[in-house]
Amino acid sequence: MSTSTPKEESANGYEHDYPEPLHTIHKDEYDVVIIGAGPAGLMLASSLARLAGRADGIQARTIEVLKNMHPLGQQMLDRASASYERTFWDPTPDMKGIERTRRAISVPKEIEIGNGATLGLQQGLIEQAFLRDMERRAQRVTRPWTFKSLQVRSSGSHPVTVEIEKVNERLERVGETKTIRAKYMVGCDGGRSAVRQFLEKHHGVEMKGDWVDTLWGAIDAVVKSDFPDLRKIAAVHSGHYGAMYIFPRENNGDGQPVVRIYTQVDKRTGSKSGEKPWEEREKITVQDIIDTDKKIIAPYKLEFKKVEWWTAYPIGQRLISRYATMDNRVLLAGDACHTHSPKAGQGMNTALMDCHNLSFKLHHVLSGIGQPILLEDYHTERWKVGKRLIDFDMEYSALFSGEIPKSTPEVANYTPDQLKLHFSNIQRQNAAVYYWRWGQLLVKRCVNTQPVDLLQEIQFDSPGAFRLYVLTGPTRYQHLNSSRIFLLPHCMGFSMETWKDFKGLNAGLYADDEELGGTWNRTQESHVGGTHIKWGLPDGGVVVVRPDGYVGVVVPLVEAGWRALEKYFAGFLIEQQAREARL
């Protein structure tokens, strides 16, 4: 449920092809009620629909997840602007201009994720893709309604009672209310979350944090410039006028390339303003941001042809005390849980990963196969990620603004060169992944000998299952007598006939002869067993990958390994009556 309207979202030169929303609520009971229809709420709704049958930057891990939600991910990729490199600019020795001091690939290679790009795409287009994905599964957003209150009873099939109120196009309440019941409610209604504020006021939830003493502006514009890195991610520090951050975006509705520019505006006069950021914010105009951009980027020229959107904001880093509360019947996700600087490009990305994590856990609990402990795990896992994000942003945003981070006061003793290197290394951490992913594993699909990445082989779709990857180790069939054969399609004696009794398994059979680092095999020049070696399982093992793509557990191919698997799944699944397995 959302307060925004398609007409409102179609401003700024974009033609959004939004499905027509629902305006009337016909049912009184739902499994899950989602408050908020921005990227976080739509990601959760789209994910749950799949399992049941003003942001703009998309980081590499998010791209990886969206690729597994075909055709949703590909639609975003096709429209977005990709940045493969980040550049760093600092003052010239005479402090009268800027010069490029370092270049780096956008995503560190050691992360082994996607194609190494960060994508720029307007939030409205991201929301459009989610809305269309929901429509394909007969789901639509109900607008325009706003959250009013909630209650949770101790019993009943639908213990959460939610009161919502209708608003008009100016977001004014019109007096029409509706009460609905749900098994669970999720607040995905942004940094000013009405759900979170209600929980803070009535149920002891706290939003804790601090502010950075600096003021920034953000602007989306079509520009003309001789600055050479305008279509790359560029961090620019000037000698006297603060910093700016350039992030290339997609073409607008007129086919013109858009760029997002973040600008430090509290040094626009050449020295730090003495005003409080939240007070100074009210005085900032779009012309102040434009003039400051031109000063920072000098001697390069910057002409603003069209301004599509702008804002000014102080930087605050705050984190919710609980992602799940009221017996885990009420949950929060996205900016309702964590607020921070937008320059790291992690707000929407972290929100989408919150909802990706929550969706499969909610689905398993609602389906009767998952224990409620899964929802407590959602809080535990995502709160840790949120804490790391806030800690990172506190250091990153302070360094970007030319301040000494409170968390790392030792950087005050760094030389200028050490400080530049430290900042660039910190800046690239926004592509980091906080849990152990399966990672890029290149194998060969045996049925047609096609090289593939295992992570992209299974879509995030019904039934939302855990994936068990069995790494067989050196094959022990008698006619495969080599001690280093890992199911090679072209090895002497190997044939798909070997697996004819395993009906339906052929499509899921892979040869480990693509990943580097394995043993050379004389029958072909590819590396053999590289995936086994890469994951520390030269003799084989079982890797359990969760529906959200993270590794759950790794066990060896021995009796103790099977017992460990049983213990792992018994920790959060409900024992079911045995039935025929589906392959």
Image: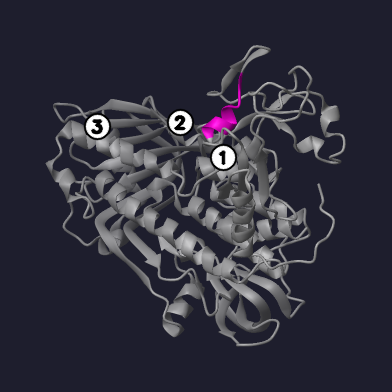
| Residue 22, picture quadrant | bottom right
Give the mark nearer the N terminus: 3 vs 1. Answer: 3
177 shown above or below 445: below
SS for tag 3? strand
Q: How many marks?
A: 3
**What colour scheme was applied to this rendering of the protein?**
one colour
253 shown above or below 329: above
* Image: magenta residue range: 527-534
Task: Give how far across and how far down residue 548 sits, in percent.
Answer: 60, 51
What is the three-letter code of the residue carrying label 3? Asp
What is the three-letter code of the residue carrying label 2? Lys
Nearer the camera: disc 3 or disc 2 = 2
Residue at the (67%, 48%) spot, across then down: 467
**Residue tagged 3:** 90
SS for tag 2? helix
Q: Is residue 143 visible?
A: yes
**Residue tagged 1:** 252
| Residue 223, picture quadrant | top left
Give the mark nearer the N terminus: 2 vs 1. Answer: 2
Is the residue under label 1 in contact with that under label 3 (CB below 8 Å)?
A: no
- Alpha-carbon neighbours of circle 3 within 10 Å: few (<14), some, or many (≥20)? some
Looking at the picture, tell me which residue is in the foreground, 257 or 348: 348
Question: Which numbered tag is attached to residue 109?
Answer: 2
Is the residue under label 2 in contact with that under label 3 (CB below 8 Å)?
A: no
Looking at the picture, tell me which residue is in the foreground, 419 or 528: 528
